[in-house]
Structures are given as structure tokens and as C-alpha cells.
Amino acid sequence: MHESPVRNYSWYALSLLTLIYVFNYLDRTIIYILLPLIKREMAFTDLQLALLGSMSFVIFFTVLGIPFGRLADRAVRKNMIAAGLAVWSLFSGLTGFATGFWSLLVCRVMVGVGEATLGPAALSLLSDYFPPRVRATVQAIYSSGIAIGAGLAFFLGGWLGQYYGWRLAFYALGFPGLIIAVLAYFLREDREARRKLQARSTRRAIGRSCSNQCRSGITISVMAALVLLQTTFRFGDQHSSRASTSSTY
């Protein structure tokens, strides 16, 4: 069977989404390499550093992942990605303007909120752009953004922090994501592929529902038959017992 070639635009979308994933890991990781400089300037305790480095981001990123996943099934996914990227890039850059613990904490929380939008929407988009025969390759390319982003965060964050200060590191690595958000907004979604996928999912759901109803009906029928048989045998035993008692008397 002839297999249709993958469109060039699909590879462009993959490149852009991979770049966004790089920024995703860069902005979430950069604070770890800059924490010693932040602690030295603001005299934070170890508990405050722990809250800034993990809890402020992880809690909101984890809790909001599922709701954003459900939203990605209904909303325009490219808009979700663009809005999320704009939010986390803006607040990653604004981290450089922080004046104390609470302003830093708010920035880290909003970075987590923005980044929670990417995973579900991007994976859903990629499944529309590419057929099943190349999706493993696509996932491998997209996932490379993790290592690239984390590596750039430690290298560029360390270099900028050492020579220009931790504030400029946030400016330089956070705000450029706003430009990428504009490109994400103008991505084209394959609406026809999504409609087919939704129709297929609906048919499967209807099939599962009918199958479950059939199984339930069969189970109820079998149980009713067993109860009826049990009642019949019990009535027959009682009738036989009464007949034998009458004949005895």
C-alpha cells in the first residue's frame, strides 16, 4: 500500500515545538545554577532556596497538568502553547527584577503554571502532524529538547551569571521566549486529522458503551435465570416434602 509522504510543514512544526521544549527546560532549570548567587545577594535560608528551587514550581506544574490535558482535547492547542510560552517566558525574565523572596516565589509559580500547558498540547499536535509509522522518531526528536534545554541552562546560566550577574541571565534567557510564542501562535493545526481522531474516539466510546451494556444485560439475565431456577427447585422441594408428609398421615 502506498504511504503518503510527510509534509514539509509537519517537520517545521516539529522543529518549532522542539525549540519550545528547549526553552521549557531551560527556563525551569536555570534557577538551580543561579541559586548560590541569589542566596549570596539576598541572604536566603536553605528552606527558602528549597521552596524556590522545587516546591514553588513542581506543585503547580504537577497539579495543573491534568486540567490542561483535558483542555487540550477541547481548545485550540497552538493557542494554549503560545499563551503558556508567553507566560513562563515573561515571568522567567521578570525573575531578574525580583527584590525579595516573595517576588521570586511568584515568578517561579507562574513559570510552573505556564509550562504545564506545553506537554499535553504539543504531544497531541504532533500526533496530528505525523502518521503512526514515524511517530517514534518524532517523539525522540521532540524529547531531545530535555537534554538540550537543561544543558544550555547550566552552561549559559553559569557563564552569564559569572560574568554579568544572575539578573541578566534571567533577562537574556527568559524574554526571548516571547518571540517564539508569536511563531507558535501562527502554527496551523490539522483540523481534519483532529476531526477524524475525535470521530474515531467517539465510535470507540460508543462501541465500548454498547459492549458494556450488552455484558450488563447478559449478566442480569443470567442472574435472573439462576434466581428463577433456584426458586423453582426450592418450590419443588417444598411441594414434594408436603406431599410426602400428607401421604404419611
Image (cartoon, rainbow, N blue to C red):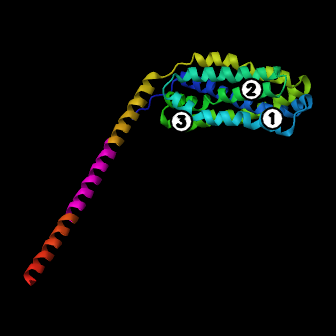
Q: Earlier in the sequence, mark 3 or mark 2?
A: 2
Q: Nearer the viewer, residue 221 or 32?
A: 221
Q: Secondary structure at mark 2?
A: helix
The dot on residue 233 is none
Q: Give the distance between the C-alpha atoms of the residues marked 1 and 3, in whole angstroms.
A: 33 Å
Which residue is identified by label 1?
32
Q: Is 229 left or right of 27, judged from the image as shown?
A: left
Q: Position of residue 82 (x, y in %)?
A: 61, 20
> Which residue is rendered at x = 71% and y = 33% of the image?
57
Q: Position of residue 37 (x, y in %)?
A: 89, 31
Q: Three-letter amino acid code at disc 2?
A: Val
Q: Is residue 60 above or below residue 168?
A: below
Which residue is identified by label 3?
135
Q: Three-letter amino acid code at disc 1?
A: Tyr
Q: Secondary structure at mark 3?
A: helix
- Crowding at dot 3, Cα within 10 Å, few <14 / some 14-19 / many 20+, comes out as some
Q: Which residues are magenta?
A: 210-229
